[in-house]
Image: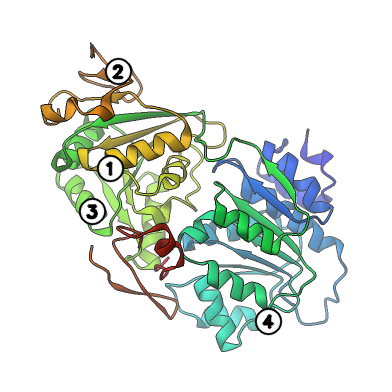
Amino acid sequence: MLFTDLKLSEPILKAISDQGYTAPSPVQAQAIPYILEGRDMLAGAQTGTGKTAGFTLPMLEILSRKTHNIKAPRQVRALILTPTRELAAQVGESVKLYGKYLKFKSAIIFGGVGMQPQVAALRQGVDIVIATPGRLLDHMSQGTIDLRHVEILILDEADRMLDMGFIKDIRRVISVLPQKRQNLLFSATYSDDIKGLCESILRNPAIVEVARRNTSSELVTQRVILVDCARKSALFGHLAVEKNWKQVLVFTRTKHQANKLSDYLQKIGVSATAIHGNKSQAARTKALADFKAGSVRILVATDIAARGLDIDQLPHVVNLELPNIAEDYVHRIGRTGRAGNEGEAISLVCVDEYDYLKSIERLIGKKFDREIVAGFEPDPAIIAMPILQGRGLSQGNHSPSGKPQGQKRERGTRQQDGGRNHNTKGDTGRNGRSNKQRKEGNRKSY
């Protein structure tokens, strides 16, 4: 199938061609026809499979087909909600990219930056708004945005928004939208909360699922290296230097650990920078730009970067610390192995994280071999633990792309997101909390 087979108009096809694309990805090929029919839809696909274009292209097509009095003030006709600033910026860029031959105006609305430029853009009139829930509610409360004419509502990375405690905000937004509208919900993973949200807002939805639920990409080689907790940074630094890694995204659970690793890497001569919720939006944007440009080799991130980083050929993702929510592992490693490219995900696991490791293995239906890097062997007593049974334990020097040699049997802080104060705990706001507390509790500064 080609994009020309999808009944898209010439201006959109021209924009697609400008990007060098001719054939849609599987999720695009399945989703676009349903959306063009005007149906509600629930789409599930692994991250990096082209979901953004999967809803951006048909949204632009639908809006362009409907006549609109160009002399009348522009009204918000499409609303796209995303969980993070980075993802909002990425989606906004796609809207401009594929709509460049159309006459639509769009606005990106998120916290961490001043409201006045956003207010000015809204006053001039926009057709499409891409927003994070917190800042959107700020505009709603101040009367600077009118959502009474929305024709299409898109929830991008809906599972992540629910994970971050945005469900009440989403329902507040939906309560002011027209009853008659098209609803599109995109999610990398499914949960009972996602099913409940679908039942409440989707009407006879088409279901698109291009991969088994909660699975990791087959293009990503996944490895687990055992190490003592206190030696993780040293081991990562050793691997980065020895293997001469040029571009690596490293995940930590907390902002403190992200800063600590970044500082350590710089001390040993490896260019690195950190990105997390305490960084200003300008600092986050610069860090990501430097990383993409190759002027910084290592980007150390908390889970805010698990969604919204769009780097087609990122070769390595490393979990310095495993996430305490298994689904987040899928999102993290989804930053590599994108757009048909192969990737590698390495997890440095210490004894405190073995329960997290088991949860991840249950979720994705795969049990990893445990490896040990010479010179960084964990406490011998750990090797005999039951968690290591069932798969081989490899020892020796390891190459990230090669085979092993030899075989052997933060207290909470107050943060600001666009005028909305939120309590946080650690960086994810979830450490030590029950699932119910995590999903219904206070939101973070994203």
Dot 1: element: loop
The chosen color scheme is rainbow
Callout 1–callout 2 Cβ contact below 8 Å: no
Q: Is residue 201 left or right of residue 381?
A: right
Amino acid type shown at disc 3: Gln
Residue mark closest to the camera, 2 vs 3: 2
Badge 1 or badge 3: first in the primary sequence: 3
Q: Is residue 301 left or right of residue 82?
A: left
Residue mark closest to the camera, 4 vs 2: 2
227 in relation to 433, above or below: above
- What percent of the width, then of the height, locates residue 225? 26, 30
Amino acid type shown at disc 1: Leu
Badge 3 or badge 4: first in the primary sequence: 4
What residue did someone put label 2 on?
A: 392
Badge 4 or badge 1: first in the primary sequence: 4
- What percent of the width, then of the height, locates residue 59? 74, 58
Q: Is residue 364 visible?
A: yes
Amino acid type shown at disc 4: Asp
Callout 4–callout 2 Cβ contact below 8 Å: no
Amino acid type shown at disc 2: Gly
> Spatial distance from mark 1 to mark 2, Cα to Cα?
22 Å
What residue did someone put label 3 on?
A: 257
What residue did someone put label 1 on?
A: 320
Callout 1–callout 3 Cβ contact below 8 Å: yes
Residue at image coords 30%, 52%: 253
Residue at image coords 78%, 52%: 35
What residue did someone put label 4 on?
A: 146
> Spatial distance from mark 4 to mark 1, Cα to Cα?
44 Å
Dot 3: element: helix
Dot 4: element: loop
- What percent of the width, then of the height, locates residue 182? 76, 62
Q: Is residue 155 visible?
A: no
